[in-house]
Image (tube, rainbow, N blue to C red):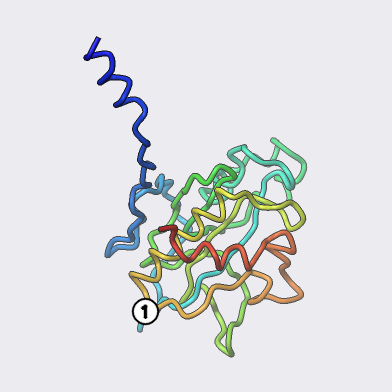
Amino acid sequence: MPALSVAVAIDQRPQRRKRSRRLTIDADGYASIATRVPTPNFDARPAPTDISLVVVHGISLPPGEFGGDGVERLFTNRLDPAAHPYFATIAGLRVSAHFLIRRDGHLIQFVPCARRAWHAGESTWRGRARCNDFSIGIELEGTDDVPYTPSQYAMLGRVVRALRRRYAIDDVVGHSDIAPGRKTDPGPAFDWPRFRRSLTPAR
């Protein structure tokens, strides 16, 4: 009987919250918890290399559909133009981003941060053109008019905090900010105040 009492007492003790594994960026620019999906769509950053900008994008393939492998296929040049009518219009593109954050918060990395991903296109920020040269591109699985998920905001906050520890990040902007009139993502569905709150880690 005493042993049973001890067991009950142990079971009733408050459970500690399980801490998430710390996300870090290594010297080559790889995130410690990301699933790596290599792509040939990257090149060297021009010298001198400075990484000072994070660009937030929104993407879904086919448009408005979540959960498929269309984005990974696009970024690795494996998109089947016959799989969906929209794919035939973009299958020839050679594009990439450093990261993709899925709806459930899963983090995928295509390009090491030390290298230049092809995500921004024709772009300018604070009078400086060619944002790919000095930025990190983070794609969120979503659309301009569908709310992004709590898991995505949490992971985005973790990634940006880790990037700030590794690089001198001055600004975090949307694709629409660096290519106004040409791009609209991450769109009005992206909650910037909520994102900014995610930059303060929970205690």
Report the side of 5 relative to 55 (left or right).
Answer: left
Q: Quadrant of the image for the N terminus?
A: top left
Residue 148: percent from the left, percent from the top?
Answer: 65, 52
Q: Say which quadrant the C terminus sits in.
A: bottom left
Q: Is residue 49 above or below residue 92?
A: below
Identify the element where label 1 is drawn.
loop
| Image quadrant in which you'd find residue 126 | bottom right
Report the residue that reaches farthest toward the top: 1
| x, y percent for residue 101 | 53, 51
149 or 70: which is nearer to us?
149
Q: Nearer the viewer, residue 62 or 202?
A: 202
Q: Position of residue 154 (x, y in %)?
A: 51, 54
Residue with the most extreme left position = 3
Query: What residue do we see at 51% from left, 70% from top?
Result: 54
- The amino acid type of the residue labelled 1 equals Thr
Residue 107, relative to residue 68: is it above or below?
Answer: below
Q: With 161 as the anchor, is 123 left or right in this view?
A: right
What residue is pinned by disc 1? Answer: 49
Percent from the top left, x then y, of residue 74?
A: 58, 48
Q: Residue at x 36, y 82 (%)?
A: 47
Figure check: 35 above or below 42: above
